């Protein structure tokens, strides 16, 4: 009597299932990484284009004011919203609304990468003023005249430190390297802030540790290195570039006086020119 042979059951062994699952997980991870990378690159391109529009609008101000640089932060009672309504302080002191007259589309120039809906919110005027994706180098360009200024250009301080802020385009030593705007954040997962602050003033300001998304925004002057460790930066000559943390820690990119003295570790000191 012949022994009946059962046909081999079809299907995968446990080992084959584990290997297949691992391969699928790896491919899915690679796909997700590629998608995030493409999305991040698209956001970066959007921000670079916005920075180009923004610096063009910024440079039209001195063109209309005999070369004078727009104050980085200063209340202006004549500033209005898009409907012509006067804006109160601090909205009329921050650069977005003061620059709006020179910007063809404030929503396309100032707000992007998730902030586009700010103009539709009930407090849109405030959000526009406080949350542009690019912050301005207010202390060294035009001067920060606000009550919360880290160094207001008052007569007393100017007498002590000298003229530490640039007020006219003709004063610029290396405008192609002098930061006007840079990618900014106000907190973790919160892109956008109206100002950026330099690594040093009269003393070191930035943290000595490397940038981390988990660290307070103020620890790196509200600058956001959100593109693989780089920030979108618009300079006074109208050029836009990506800069890493080492470059942004160089005071020659922030202060005209530091550029003149060729001092990357420049500090504002008593008796400075």
Image (spheres, rainbow, N blue to C red):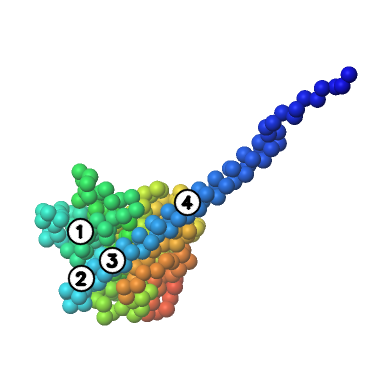
Mark 2 or 3: the one toward you = 3
- Report how many numbered discs are placed on residues in the image: 4
Label 1 element class = helix
| Residue denoted by label 2 | 61
Q: Quadrant of the N terminus?
A: top right
| Residue denoted by label 1 | 97
Task: Measure the alpha-carbon separation of dots 1 and 4.
Answer: 35 Å
Mark 1 or 4: the one toward you = 4
State the image coordinates of residue 208 (x, y, percent, origin top left).
48, 59
Mark 3, Cα crowd under 10 Å, few <14 / some 14-19 / many 20+, is: many
| Residue denoted by label 3 | 53
Q: Residue at x 27, y 53 (%)?
A: 130
Label 2 element class = helix
Label 4 element class = helix
| Residue denoted by label 4 | 35
Q: Residue at x 24, y 76 (%)?
A: 168
Badge 3 or badge 4: first in the primary sequence? 4
> In the image shown, does 132 or 206 lie closer to the viewer?
132
Task: Measure the alpha-carbon separation of dots 2 and 3.
Answer: 13 Å
Q: Is residue 176 visible?
A: yes
Badge 2 or badge 1: first in the primary sequence? 2
Badge 4 or badge 2: first in the primary sequence? 4
> In the image shown, does 87 or 199 lie closer to the viewer?
87
Q: Residue at x 47, y 60 (%)?
A: 229
């Amino acid at each position: 009597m012949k022994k009946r042979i059962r046909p081999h059951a079809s299907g995968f062994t446990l080992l084959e299932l584990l290997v297949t699952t691992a391969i699928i997980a790896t491919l899915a991870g690679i796909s997700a990484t590629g998608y995030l990378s493409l999305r991040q690159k698209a956001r970066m391109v959007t921000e670079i284009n916005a920075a180009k529009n923004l610096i063009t609008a910024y440079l039209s101000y001195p063109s209309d004011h005999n070369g004078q640089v727009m104050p980085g932060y200063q209340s202006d009672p004549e500033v209005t919203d898009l409907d012509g309504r006067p804006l109160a302080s601090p909205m009329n002191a921050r650069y977005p609304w003061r620059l709006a007259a020179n910007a063809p589309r404030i929503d396309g120039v100032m707000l992007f990468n998730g902030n586009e809906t700010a103009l539709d919110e009930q407090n849109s005027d405030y959000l526009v003023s406080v949350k542009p994706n690019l912050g301005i180098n207010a202390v060294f360009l035009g001067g920060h005249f606000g009550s919360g200024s880290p160094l207001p250009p008052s007569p007393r301080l100017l007498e002590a430190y000298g003229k530490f802020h640039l007020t006219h385009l003709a004063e610029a030593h290396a405008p192609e390297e002098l930061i006007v705007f840079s990618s900014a954040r106000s907190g973790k997962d919160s892109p956008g802030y109206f100002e950026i602050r330099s690594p040093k003033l009269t003393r070191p300001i930035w943290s000595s540790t490397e940038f981390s998304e988990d660290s307070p925004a103020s620890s790196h002057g509200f600058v956001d290195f959100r593109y693989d460790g780089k920030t979108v930066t618009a300079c006074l000559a109208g050029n836009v570039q990506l800069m890493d943390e080492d470059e942004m820690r160089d005071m020659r990119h922030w202060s005209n006086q530091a550029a003149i003295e060729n001092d990357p570790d420049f500090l504002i000191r008593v008796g400075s020119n």
